[in-house]
Image (cartoon, helix red, strand yellow):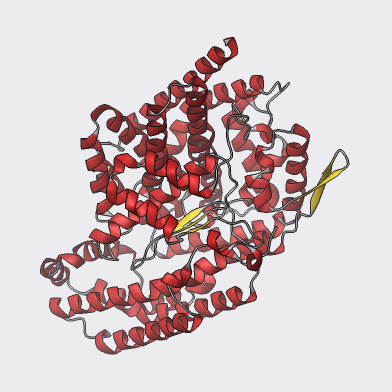
Amino acid sequence: MLKRSEVPVEQTWDLTSLFETEEKYEQQIEKSIQLADAFVENYKGKLNNAEIINRALTDYREFREVFGLAAAYMSLNVSTDLNDPKNQERQGNFGVIASNISSLLSFFESELIQIDETVLKEAATLDSQHDHYLTELLKDKPHYLHPEAEKALAAASGVLNFAPNIYNTIKLGDMDFGAFEVNGKEYPLSFVLFENEYDYDLDHDIRRAAHKKFSEVLSKYSKSTAMNYLNHVRMEKTMATLRGFDSVLDYLLDMQDVDRDLYNRQIDVIMEKFAPVARKYVTLLKDIHGLDKMTFMDLKLVVDPEFEPEITIEESRDYLLRGLAPLGQDYLDMVNRAYDERWVDFVQNQGKGTGAFCSSPYGTHPYILISWTSRMREVFVMAHELGHAGHFYNAHQHQNIFDSRPSMYFIEAPSTMNELIMATQLFKETNDPRMERWINSTLIARTYYHNFVTHLLEAHFQRKVYNLVDAGKGFTADTLNKMMKETYQEFWGDAVEITDEAQYTWMRQIHYYKGLYPYTYSAGLTIATNVRNRIVEEGQPAIDDWLEVLRAGGTKTPTELAAMAKVDITTDQPLLNTIDYLDHVVNEIIRLTDQLNKQ
């Protein structure tokens, strides 16, 4: 794999829209420090009336915007090359500065929370820009600590939250996968090559040999990775206890503005109701590929591998413009800008983060990271990440920095919505049964497998981990391996042989260091599926409702945002509707396969 310095520049993102030079980044850091110092000077011990509180909040918004751009620049550079000493140095220096500033400014919310409630409500009435921020502050009031305790926690935040950095260093910096051999030929291996290439390889010998070598290397780092993870969840449990929560789950869900019922329902209903549908699908895969048995190492096989054409980056733009056309011209203009202005980092290189993500710093445009493989499925990955981009592109135009980001529970709804809109449009363009089968199977194998299986099983496993921590117990790598394998066995039953390679899956995602993130993928897709059904039935009114949801940003709870799109997530029904739709899609794949076999 190429080094970062060797890749085509035109396939990388352009961070000069953040800062043209390193010197300007350093000036932004200095400006942030000056704003923080001035904020302390102007407001510490002086928040005694509604007018001053609003002035302070306006200045605090400015600081957040300025510092947020610097944070994005640091983070985006690291994500493309963790091995670059300059990126490592910048990340380390930023962490120290961020901890110092966080400690300096910790007085703000501590003082606000002690002010009489009527004064805070008066401040919210005087300036609607601050209404939501102050309302959320009052909601969290019971969980605030003494100001000195808050200051100490803020000062230690860089150390307390360092586990994700260690995880990425182990994964992208230390792990060396070398190569593996099949029938006398040697194949190079890396994290990205395995997840983007070999996990899908049609040659059973190559795919399974890659799995074995990949897992062999993971196993060598399992003890240190488990210790790092244990340290992280113990930190979360400590924070939960300090803030008055009996369970770390309740502490993390409180941040998402949802309760335990929504969380448990999302995991339990899918584990029970969707598992039979998923088993029916993989049984079809086994028959198509002529396998004696389906194993964990075969789960990424596709229904019609010969039909998926290669696609260039520029060709993907055409598909996306057609597929996302229902969202309107403003949305399509954003898509064009993403390509024309290099918002996207397409290349594969050493030290680059795996998977795909969208970062949307307030005050500039979004940035998308992907590792382009020239396969048609990447169009759906791009649609997904552009869903995040479109969400914040809209929210940032209509909401301030306090109100632009919704609950994590809702964060994956716009991204998965785009995949479904893409598929719906592609169906309209074809009468070819093979193309129809490819679209349906891509929905199952990528959109829903990724969110309703991969991340859902992560969530099921993660809940076991937090239950252990709540019970005052620790864990080792062996504990995590066992729980991960058992989760796969529970979901797949007799339909799939869960080989030992499955037990290391917990080592492959950084999601476990982001609170209760994994279950939100299926939560978002549940909302998206029900909105997709509305769009098919009602057309433009449903699209208009959805665009209003995107513009609302974080001004409403997940339940309220879903209600804006006419989806009631307080009941089982949206989940059951989604599973019914998935059963229909799998049955369509089976019907089309039979039809094509008879031709």
500 shown above or below 164: above
Asked whether, in this view, residue 129 is left or right of residue 12, the answer is: left
Furthest-top residue in view? 598
How far across and how far down the image is residue 148, in percent?
A: 38, 80
Task: Residue at 36% x, 42% y: name it.
Answer: 324
How far across and how far down the image is residue 331, in percent?
A: 31, 49
Q: Nearer the viewer, residue 110 or 284?
A: 284
Task: Residue at 35% x, 46% y: name it.
Answer: 259
Classify residue 88 by image quadrant.
bottom right
Furthest-right residue in view? 184
Residue 452 seen by the camera:
yes
Residue 556 seen by the camera:
no
Q: The N terminus is located in which quarter? A: bottom right
How far across and how far down the image is residue 121, in percent?
A: 14, 67
378 shown above or below 425: below
- The number of numbered badges drawn on the structure is 0
Q: Nearer the viewer, residue 141 or 432?
A: 432
109 shown above or below 202: below
Task: Residue at 24% x, 36% y: name it.
Answer: 542
Q: The C terminus is located in which quarter? A: top right
